[in-house]
Image: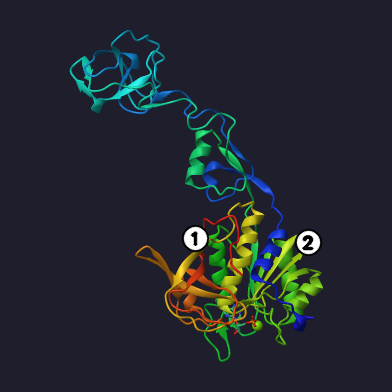
Amino acid sequence: MTLNRQPISVFDAVSKVVENVSHIDVETVKLEDSYNRYLAEDLTATHNVPLFTRSAMDGFAIRSQDSAKGAEFKVVEEVPAGSMSDYELKEYEAFRIMTGAELPKSADTVVMFEQANVTEDTFTLRKTFEPYDNVAIEGEECEKGEVILHKGSQINPGTVATLATFGYAEVKVYRVPVVGVLSTGSELLEVSDELERGKIRNSNTPMIMAQLERIGVHAKRYNLEEDNLETLLEKIEKMFNEVDAVITTGGVSVGDYDLLPKVYDKLGAEVLFNKVAMRPGSVTTVARAQGKFLFGLSGNPSACYSGFELFARPAILLMQGSTRAFAPFINAKLGEDFKKANPFTRFIRAEIDFIDGTVISKPAGFNKSNAVTSIAKSNGVIVLPGGTRGFEAGDEVQVMMTDVTSGVSHFQVKQ
Ligand code: AMP
Ligand code: MG
């Protein structure tokens, strides 16, 4: 079974993940807890904004028909913010008005203090004024009933302000999925363990937890498992019952002790794909069981990193209804030669910089699939399409901006 894997393109693999996403349930949270969550209902204006026609400046409210260069006005009343007046202005009369105060019905324009020659109770104009100069008109920003943001929008600071404006003390959002992370491999040690011959420390679990944190998910961490079918199956079954999505690392390849394919089999999971035409991480596997995703990422740190960004990130965001679940792809100039040819799409941890108006990307150091330090130095991933030729400095390439958390609506990789 595992030896006969058919590779599918990166784009098709991402599409399969997207097609299989189902929305997670909805909960109501307080406004102050809503930041970074995803709206589960449209945000509708509960009133006009501005709610009433008001002065946009500190100055004098007058009738525009009285305005002319040199015209002299008498100040009859003062209207600070939060007050109002029903006084009927007569010819060449004015209110002294402050920003945010309701514009009295008999006035239609505001002269800024800086636009008037002011004496004690009077002022003269330096120019004429049109109706509604320096005035914010009722409903000019939005009208009652208007949909301001659609469900699936991420709540940013501006959304919080908008919710507050309309009196939403609570808001319906998608629940943050519980995502379990488990690293497998008999060679693995915990971070605090002393190194032993033939063993390495587990760097994947903490890395994925940080990648999850970056998209607003606090992961559920599981302790290491050895390459033993019985205990591994037991652990993943337990995990499966406790979480909304399972991420494992290691054991998806075709080695003698790569046991995840057997685990999927025993769980009765549907394997969406188990070979992707990409390097590193061609063995990356995504499966579904009982409406939950199982992401089987390669144990190689770099492969694990890009596998998460390509498949787990959008799936976890789409589960929450996100309309911008994908890391943006941008075009960049390659900063140095990359001669290694490859039949598969290649993902290279990269340093992206903006120099003299051009985006330059270059590999971030040692770049084999087991590299971990190059991930640390990177702030994006160069994506080279499959083909036999290498690439040269100056070639235009695509870069996946993994570090940009406000994503885009579509996966834009070039094949
Ligand atoms: P695997 O995917 O199990 O075949 O592992 C591929 C390579 O990644 C091996 O060299 C492993 O030792 C290494 N590896 C596996 N899991 C981890 C991990 N959690 N942290 C760091 N390296 C790992
Ligand atoms: Mg292994």
Which quadrant of the rendered structure holds the C terminus? bottom right
On whether ligand 1 comes within 8 Å of the CB at mark 1, the answer is: no
Query: Which residue occupies 50% across, 34% down?
Result: 165
Q: Which labelled disc corresponds to residue 290?
A: 2
Q: Secondary structure at mark 2?
A: loop
Residue on which the image places disc 1: 404
Label 2: how many residues lie within 10 Å, few (<14), some (14-19) or many (20+)? Answer: few
Quadrant of the drawing holding the N terminus = bottom right
Q: Which mark is residue 70?
A: none
- Compared with 403, 372 (above or below) is below
Is residue 345 visible in the rendered structure shown here? yes
The amino acid type of the residue labelled 1 equals Val
Residue 217 sits in quarter: bottom right
Vertical relation: 267 (above or below) 324? below
Above or below 100: residue 179: below
Of the pair 60 and 240, the residue shown nearer to us = 60
Query: Can residue 205 be seen at all in this image of the molecule?
Result: no
